[in-house]
Image (cartoon, coloured by chain):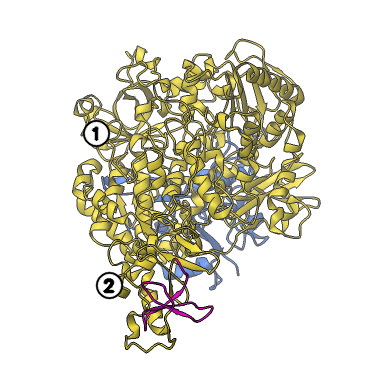
């Protein structure tokens, strides 16, 4: 079995937001949609003992996604390899899934296509991934702070990282079983 | 996603293009079908980016098709600045521009035509070629803020600027005022990887930058005090004996003088200037000097310090030299110009610019190292070494701000025409108000641009230029490394856009330059000419890109072992003879900055904060990309960073619009309250203009409102005397909130030319200085002793030779010696000296002669003499025997202990030969 997952190495992320822009241009997103923002609380501490951490966000492609079971028209769905995606032809833009996602990872564009609007979200660039390529945000990251691969393959980089380092997940207590893992930046000057 | 673009569909070609939005030129794969680019992505096989692309790289398609792009030549129909244009054909525009330029040349001389450039974004050699053949020396870039003075100082000191850092085996690297985390993304990945492998990162930055966050040692110094820090680090390395003794003895000259000179610049001296603890400075010096090999990475801060800049670059050059990090594995490599392909300098046709025109270069009387006087010396030395010189574009240019002043004042002469190419001068040159006035004032203005910028708005003609994906690009690091990366165009330029090469080529032919000087019809043909000497089996430039793409010669180490360094003395000149000849201090000498709180306490009371600006930040590059919504949304307003403590005192909260004011003017930016800077420091973003605003003729596109260059000064006395760069780091400022009662006051609209801002008016007219170009012809320094008749002095080996017999002259003893057998010969008779019997022998005949009288000795066979062989090779008459460093002559660099240098092998081998 294949189970796609992503690891965000926060030790390497410098907050350049290239992934944010790259994803928008590759997927031709309208101006009000962002699939992967990079968030930060800014620099913390008292100068010069300061620190900053950047957290790239993205759809967590949960194993237990609340956004698929709530969809009334089966547009929001999950494939066997774990990729959660929206079939735009079936979507009727009811936004139930938008509200159900605890990560704010999906939204409806209010700008484009007034006659047929549909919910958009990251689909791990499934067209690229199934051709054997990397998702575009992974490819574009100069810092190689994003690592993508098959978690079920013990030889893959993601499975090595997830199984050997202390990784964190966002809102694990919600039992969504998110499949985006974070290697935290522990702070201070290394 | 309904109209998914299939990049794997039949008929889709993959073109190996590159990004053109900063200097990295990351590889881009463009998927092209029927002359249309469908998609782009990073090229995973490209050596620079390995598939990565930053915000800027990813917007290439939006840039290509942006509705605000200029697509046709525009001719002004209304008044200047009214934004009224007529679309005309390319050829018509070219011929009208050529006619006007020729008229100005006939009336006022070719020097009345100047060109302004930006950064490495055009085919600059073609611009230079045009200007040289046209006869004007007044081309310039913003090069003075961007590493060029550093290159020239380092080249003057050690023969080439160590641009190529061999980081793979390096143990420590200093990132000095360099933030790859925001301005050189592929580099940042490399540092992160190498750091894991043990590389130590020392980051010098007043701000907790993306890079400082990853430092092993972060030096948060006072902005603009880098020179004091460099001097103190050099001092520490010298007086804690952390330098490379062997390298200094064998390959450096002037160590003794430097020793005496550097005594004054202790870390304790630097502490109040840099706000660092003396022990922090020592720690940095030790970390760098004790971890060998190490590097000092390039960075532009050193060039942006204004008056103190030159000494700082000089000190940094010496730091790498005396630690022995030059041209060694893991160190700072000095490749020299490429011998394998045609360099930009060879395409520039500098030999066609007459000497009397070189003499008229504006600024060359003041800032000599980065203009013809200094460049000529450096180029001559380089040609003596390699037969090739560094590019003159960048390294040898008019002083930009002085040209703008000449437009306004007519001094030293009236500049009547300006061609602006790939720059937005109001935002990128110092003293923006003065620059804007000059653009309004100049008689004839042509702008080659993508967009309607403030400069374009005042132009008589605006020419549409091809951008990324529309042009082939060769990336060769300004010609300072010997590698090359080539990229092809994905598509032919859309509409009537043309490459810069086309512009200069067409303009040259239209203005009557001989067609044989411009043998290449297209840029691809010219680039094929460039790569042809590589001798690869390719029939066109595109074929080279598709099959090879780059040329990386193997790294070479210790190249100085063959010819020495490319300086007049063939050694690293710790006491620089080139700087001395140009009239500058030959050793790094502290000159206080234009403004600081120690020298100017009164000024500091009015302007208590220290401003730093000019640093790069994502997603913009210089003044670009502000008009592209897909990146502008990341940072839609200009922000300055202020420490929470200071903000609290001043009543400023996060996001407030505030004025930042210096003696020269004030600008508005929003407050980013964050502890990433010291409580005394303000960090302001550079480059801001608002292309979405209207083109009002007074201040188009809000180009002064948030523009940090309003705050900087280009007064002659504030510029670096060596290179002419001006300060945008370490200026004194004050900050206060924008309020409802704000009024535009006189300081918002006035500027000074070119005197000081305290007393507006003219203080140092260029004509007050001796303007006439004093050509400084290159003369090899010659022998440090009188060369006896019949001998020839050789600059490379620093030895006077008898070429016929292959004998070297030893000036100490006055004897000749054979460099291999180490047998001494008499200077007058050329007879060999036999140390055992102390007689002379004519080797041809075997006849023996008396040492004193040189008369033949009767009764041939000599007795053994009983002398031990150990001091046999020592020169007769030289007392102290084999200890003397005489054979090393001019090359003994260490004053004492000369026996370690070249004369040591003579002793040993001489002994064995016996």
Q: Position of residue B142 (x, y in %)?
A: 49, 34
Instruction: Name the one closer to the observer, B247 or B836.
Output: B836
Q: Residue at x 46, y 37 (%)?
A: B144
Q: Colour of chain A?
A: blue
Instruction: Name the one closer to the observer, B811 or B842.
Output: B842
Q: In the image, is B328 to the left or to the right of B878?
A: right
The vertical placement of B842 against A64, above or below, is below
Determine if the magenta segment contains residue B315.
no
Instruction: Name the one closer to the observer, B62 or B28.
Output: B28
Q: Which residue is mark 1?
A: B646
Q: In the image, is A188 to the left or to the right of B336?
A: left
Structural crowding at the residue carrying mark 2, measured as other residues with C-alpha within 10 Å and reported as few (<14), some (14–19) or many (≥20): few
Disc 1 on helix, strand or loop? helix
Q: Is residue A112 visible?
A: yes
Q: Magenta part of the protein: which range?
A: B828-856
Q: Which residue is mark 2?
A: B880
Label 1 vs 2, first from the N-terminus: 1
Q: Position of residue B18 (x, y in %)?
A: 63, 47
The vertical placement of B496 against A45, above or below, is above
The image quarter in which residue B601 lies: top left
Q: Colour of chain B?
A: yellow
């Amino acid at each position: 079995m294949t189970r796609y997952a992503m690891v965000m190495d926060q030790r390497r992320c410098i907050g350049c937001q290239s992934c944010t822009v790259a994803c928008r241009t590759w997927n031709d997103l309208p101006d009000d949609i962002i699939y992967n923002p990079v968030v930060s609380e800014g620099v913390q501490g008292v100068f010069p003992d300061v620190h900053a951490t950047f957290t790239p966000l993205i759809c967590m492609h949960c194993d237990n996604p609340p956004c698929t079971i709530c969809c009334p028209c089966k547009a929001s769905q999950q494939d066997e390899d774990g990729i959660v995606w929206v079939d735009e032809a079936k979507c009727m833009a009811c936004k139930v899934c938008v509200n159900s996602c605890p990560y704010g990872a999906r939204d409806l564009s209010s700008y484009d296509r007034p006659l047929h609007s549909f919910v958009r979200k990251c689909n791990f660039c499934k067209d690229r991934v199934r051709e054997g390529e990397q998702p575009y945000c992974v490819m574009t990251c100069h810092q190689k702070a994003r690592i993508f691969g098959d978690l079920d393959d013990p030889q893959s980089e993601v499975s090595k990282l997830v199984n050997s380092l202390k990784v964190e997940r966002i809102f694990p207590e919600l039992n969504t079983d998110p499949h985006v893992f974070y290697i935290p930046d522990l702070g201070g000057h290394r | 996603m309904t109209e998914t673009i299939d990049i794997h569909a039949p008929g889709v070609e993959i073109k190996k293009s590159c990004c053109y939005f900063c200097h990295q030129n990351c590889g881009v794969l463009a998927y092209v079908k029927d002359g249309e680019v469908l998609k782009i992505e990073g090229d995973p096989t490209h050596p620079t980016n390995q598939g990565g692309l930053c915000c800027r790289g990813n917007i290439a398609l939006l840039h290509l098709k942006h509705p605000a792009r200029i697509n046709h030549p525009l001719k002004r129909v209304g008044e200047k600045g009214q934004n009224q244009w007529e679309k005309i054909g390319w050829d018509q525009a070219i011929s009208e521009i050529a006619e006007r330029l020729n008229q100005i040349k006939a009336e006022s001389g070719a020097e009345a035509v100047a060109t302004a450039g930006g950064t490495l974004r055009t085919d600059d050699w073609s611009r230079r070629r045009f200007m040289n053949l046209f006869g004007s020396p007044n081309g310039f870039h913003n090069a003075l803020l961007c590493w060029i003075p550093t290159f020239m100082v380092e080249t003057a000191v050690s023969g080439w600027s160590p641009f190529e850092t061999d980081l793979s085996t390096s143990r420590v690297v200093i990132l000095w005022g360099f933030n790859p985390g925001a301005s050189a993304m592929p580099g940042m990945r490399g540092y992160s990887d190498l750091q894991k492998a043990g590389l130590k990162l020392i980051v010098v930055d007043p701000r907790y930058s993306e890079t400082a966050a990853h430092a092993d040692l972060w030096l948060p110094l006072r902005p603009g005090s880098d020179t004091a820090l460099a001097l103190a680090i050099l001092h520490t390395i010298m007086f804690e004996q952390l330098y490379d003794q062997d390298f200094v003895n064998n390959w450096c000259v002037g160590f003794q003088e430097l020793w005496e000179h550097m005594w004054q610049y202790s870390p304790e001296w630097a502490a109040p200037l840099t706000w660092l603890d003396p022990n922090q400075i020592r720690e940095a010096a030790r970390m760098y000097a004790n971890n060998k090999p190490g590097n000092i990475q390039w960075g532009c801060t050193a060039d942006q310090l204004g008056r103190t800049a030159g000494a700082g670059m000089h000190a940094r050059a010496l730091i790498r030299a005396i630690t022995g990090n030059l041209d060694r594995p893991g160190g700072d490599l000095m490749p020299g110009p490429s011998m394998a392909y045609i360099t930009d300098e060879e395409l520039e046709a500098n030999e066609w610019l007459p000497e009397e025109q070189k003499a008229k270069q504006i600024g060359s009387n003041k800032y000599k190292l980065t203009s013809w006087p200094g460049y000529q010396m450096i180029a001559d030395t380089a040609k003596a070494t390699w037969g090739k010189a560094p590019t003159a574009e960048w390294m040898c240019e008019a002083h930009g701000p002085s040209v703008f002043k000449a437009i306004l004042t007519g001094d030293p002469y009236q500049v009547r025409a300006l061609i602006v190419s790939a720059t937005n001068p109001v935002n990128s040159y110092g003293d923006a108000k003065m620059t804007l006035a000059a653009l309004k004032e100049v008689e004839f203005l042509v702008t080659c641009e993508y967009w309607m910028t403030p400069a374009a708005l005042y132009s008589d003609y605006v020419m549409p230029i091809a951008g990324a994906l529309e042009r082939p690009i060769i990336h060769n690091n300004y010609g300072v490394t010997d590698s090359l990366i080539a990229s092809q165009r994905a598509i032919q330029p859309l509409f009537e856009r043309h490459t810069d090469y086309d512009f200069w080529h067409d303009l040259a032919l239209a203005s009557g330059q001989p067609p044989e000087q411009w043998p290449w019809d297209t840029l691809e043909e010219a680039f094929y000419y460039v790569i042809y000497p590589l001798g690869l089996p390719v029939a066109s430039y595109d074929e080279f890109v598709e099959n090879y793409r780059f040329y990386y010669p193997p790294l070479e180490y210790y190249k100085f072992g063959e010819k020495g360094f490319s300086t007049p003395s063939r050694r690293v000149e710790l006491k620089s003879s080139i700087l001395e000849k140009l009239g500058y201090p030959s050793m790094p000498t502290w000159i206080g900055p234009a403004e600081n709180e120690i020298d100017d306490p009164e000024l500091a009371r009015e302007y208590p904060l220290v401003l730093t600006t000019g640093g790069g930040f994502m997603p913009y590059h210089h003044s670009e990309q502000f008009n592209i919504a897909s990146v502008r949304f990341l940072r839609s307003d200009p922000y300055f960073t202020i420490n929470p403590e200071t903000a609290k005192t001043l009543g400023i909260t996060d996001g407030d619009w505030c004025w930042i004011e210096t003696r020269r003017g004030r600008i508005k930016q929003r407050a980013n309250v964050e502890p990433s800077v010291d409580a005394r420091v303000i960090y302001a973003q550079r480059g801001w203009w608002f292309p979405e605003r209207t083109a009002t003729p007074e201040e188009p596109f809000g180009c002064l409102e948030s523009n940090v260059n309003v705050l900087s000064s280009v007064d002659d006395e504030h510029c670096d005397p060596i290179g002419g760069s001006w300060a945008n780091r370490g200026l004194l400022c004050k900050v206060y909130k924008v309020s409802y009662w704000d009024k535009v006051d006189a300081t918002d609209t006035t500027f000074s030319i070119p005197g000081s801002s305290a007393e507006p008016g003219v203080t140092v007219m260029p004509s007050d200085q001796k303007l006439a170009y004093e050509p400084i012809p290159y003369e090899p320094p010659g022998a440090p002793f009188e060369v006896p008749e019949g001998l020839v002095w050789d600059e490379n080996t620093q030895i006077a030779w008898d070429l016929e017999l292959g004998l070297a002259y030893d000036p100490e003893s006055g004897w000749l010696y054979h460099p291999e057998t180490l047998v001494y010969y008499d200077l007058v008779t050329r007879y060999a000296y036999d140390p055992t019997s102390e007689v002379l022998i004519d080797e041809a005949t075997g006849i023996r002669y008396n040492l004193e009288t040189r008369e033949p000795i009767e009764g041939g066979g000599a007795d053994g003499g009983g002398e031990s062989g150990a001091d046999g090779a020592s020169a007769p008459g030289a007392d102290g025997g084999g200890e003397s460093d005489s054979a090393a002559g001019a090359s003994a660099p260490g004053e004492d202990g000369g026996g370690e240098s070249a004369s040591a092998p003579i002793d040993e081998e001489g002994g064995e030969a016996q």
